[in-house]
Each structure stands twice: as structure tokens, then as C-alpha cells.
Amino acid sequence: MILDTQTLVKKYGTPLYVYDFDYIENRYMTLKEAFAGKKSMINYAVKANSNLSVIAHLAKLGAGADCVSIGEVNRALTAGVDKYKIIFSGVGKRDDEIREAIQKDILMLNLESEAEMKRVELVAKELGKEARISIRVNPNIDPQTHPYISTGLHENKFGVEIDMAKRMYIYANKSEFLNPVGIHFHIGSQLTKLEPIAEAATIVADLVRSLKAIKIEIKFFDVGGGIGVVYDEEVTISPSAYAQVIFQATKGLDVTLLCEPGRYVVANAGAFFTRVLYEKNNGSKRFVIVDGGMNDLIRPSLYNAYHKIEAVGIEGEKTPADVVGPVCESGDFFGKDVPLPPLSHNDIVVVHSAGAYGFTMASNYNTRAKPAEVALWRGKDRLIRKRETYEDQVRLEMDYL
Ligand SMILES: *Cc1c(COP(=O)(O)O)cnc(C)c1O
């Protein structure tokens, strides 16, 4: 990332998220080009980083959006994503969300149960409209990733079994108010192996073939997201190999291929900057206490996720330290036994690969204001979200005196 850290933190303060938009562009284009041989669309998974500037930047490149709430659908629309490039996924949708999505005429609602299909049909009927839908198939494939981010096994809450999916397609096809245009699977996140994806794609493509045999034509074949990135020394999936596997599985089918990358597009584009408050030792244990906390970046606490951590521009012999925040939880850490030089007040520590599931998972726990967000693009920096204030946090509270 090209940046002068000291200038940035002086200008915007800490804790701070910084995103490299040139990198985001590059990742989007790489994936787009990998799929270029076929009809395809990249639907950026908004939940990974839903800042309007991030979505708008991708929208200008032609990206669609994969959304998991009506809030995200509205973010995508606000940021200029074409309505026919928006998918609304998620295991539980409220009636009002379903209604709004149908009224806003997005590409499709991605359904995850029979009960949900019946709700969507009812809402569409009330509106006198036809809802375009896809069905999320759970292919019962072990994605070989962290159990918290595995979604494609029957033991996970996501999607429906193949047989159920088929029954749902037959029902939807007969319904006056449902139009089954798509099929979908998403087996997990931070996938580093192609085999599970190939297996899932093959199972789902076979279902498309069997539907075709009974005159149900699926137009959109959505392979979900989940392409893994390098946080440490992972060997992960190459976009071209990924696309080839999907081409192979869908051979002979006249479908538009959709993929929904989140992490792949933004994770390594982002860094989280935090300032050292103090060092302390408990016996032989060394702690570096910083001004960012688990409320700003929860991945280490939530998934025991690894993020590379470095001190910016500080020399000296490195010894292991736990990098911890001020939040009142023992789980409030960014890294354990991180080799760091001796640090003092105001030194800057950077937590790398923080562009995905960083700010979007931030909270106000401990009444801590959410950090500011900055974009770097073509050598220029730009504030894309102001630092929250105390007033922002209490604005909606009332009737307390
Ligand atoms: C979370 C999610 C994605 C994106 O996952 P990444 O691992 O960030 O690529 C894509 N599709 C669906 C349905 C999701 O829930």
C-alpha cells in the first residue's frame, strides 16, 4: 500500500481504517477477466465492507451486489449499483424486507427454505407482482475452512437439500407469483481449496440439468463467494483456476455465471492503524496496549483469526508481545506473541488485511466511537466515513431524565 502513515494518522487520527482503492479495482478486474470467457457477473458481497464509497467504486467498474438485508440492498442502490445486478440473500427475511425488495425490482431474492418461499409468494401476491427468485442449495460439502465460516454442510443453517430444492423449483415454476430464475450455493468463506467448490458446482449443475429436463430453465448460476485470501502464508485459490472449475461443471448449460466475492475483493486492500498507549509486563508476559479494540476489529476475538501486525517505522530487537485493546474483555486482542520492537506512547501499529469484515463488524461496545475510514486512490487520500462522536452514539436514546 502506498501511503505515508504518519501523515495519514496525523490527518485523520486513530484508530483508523485505510483502504487501497487501486487494489480493490485490481482484484475486481482480475476476477472479472477470469470469467470473461462466459456470460458472467461479479456481485460484490456488500457485508464484507459496506462503505458507500467502496460499493460505488465497484459499481462504476460494473459490479453487481450480493446483499443480506434490505439495508444492504439500499446501500447498493444508493451507491449506484444497477437494480438488475442486486441479489438479496440471507436465511431470514422479514415481510417488510421481502416487500421492499420486490417493489424495488432487484434481480432476485435468494431463498433458503420452503417456508420462506411461501412467504415470498404471499407478499408478491399482495403486491400483485411476480418475484424473481433463486434457491440456495446446500450441497452438503465440507469446505475445509473454519467451522464458524462453513455454510455448506447440512449441519449449517444455510440453504436446502437437493431434493427439497427440486420440489421448490417445481412449486415456484407453477406459481403465478414466483419466477425461478436462479440457483445458488455458497459453501463457506476463506476457502483455499478448489475441490469442494468443484464438487458443489457439479452437484448443483446436475440439478440444473434435471430441472431443464422438466422444462424449468435456470438462467443464473450463482457460485457464491468464499475465495480465500492470504492473511499469513496460506496458499489459496487462483481466480483463473476457480473460473475454469466452474466452466467445467456447467459445461453445456446456457447460464449466466454469478459469483459473490467479498473478502477476495477487499480484505487485503485494508489496513487498521492504531496507536500505542503503553506497554506493560505481567510477570514475564509482555503486553502492548493500543487505542483500537475488539469493537473496531473483532476477527481475532471472534474467529481467532490471524492478522499480520507491525510497528510502523520502529527499529529495535523484537520480542513477543500480545497486542491488546482497552475493552473490558480478555478476548480483546489483535494478536498474540507478535514479534515487536520496544514501543512507546504514540507509536503506530498496523494490523494488515483488515479490509473485509473489519469495519462492518464494528460496534459501539464500551461506548467507543467507531473509527474513521479513508480511501487511497491514484495517490490521493479521501475521508469516506467520519469518526463517530459521542453525540452520534446517543442520538437515538430518549426519555432518560
Ligand atoms: C458472506 C457471503 C458471501 C461473501 O463471502 P466471502 O467469503 O467474503 O467471499 C457471498 N455470498 C453469500 C450468500 C454470503 O453470505
Image (cartoon, rainbow, N blue to C red):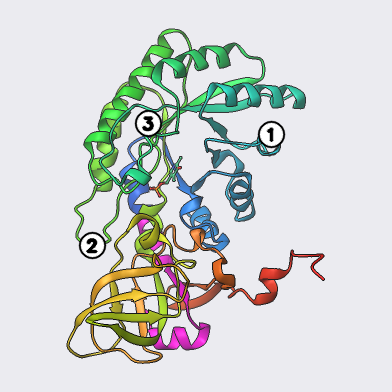
Which residue position holds label 2? Answer: 232
Identify which residue is drawn at 35% across, 53% down.
264
Residue 155, numbered label? 3
Amino acid type at mark 1: Asp
> Eyeballing the image, is 30 above or below 321?
above
Label 1 neighbour load within 10 Å: few <14, some 14-19, many 20+: some
Disc ID at residue 95:
1
Residue 223 occupies which quadrant of the picture?
top left
Please give the count of numbered marks on the rendered protein.
Answer: 3
Q: Position of residue 89 (x, y in %)?
A: 52, 38
- The relative height of residue 54 versus residue 210 in the rendered view (above or below) is below
Q: Residue at x 82, y 65 (%)?
A: 399
Q: Point out residue 309 in the picture as x, y percentages from the top left corner.
A: 29, 73
- The magenta segment is 1-28
Residue 300 visible somewhere in the drawing = yes
Instruction: Tell me if residue 87 comes above or below residue 352 in the rendering.
Output: above
Give me the C-alpha separation between circle 3 and circle 2. 29 Å
Horizontally, residue 97 falls left or right of residue 223, namely right
Q: Is residue 254 left or right of residue 342?
A: right
Residue found at the very far front of the displayed protein: 283
Closer to the chain start, of discs 1 and 2, is 1
Give the crowd class for mark 2: few <14, some 14-19, many >=20 residues within 10 Å: few
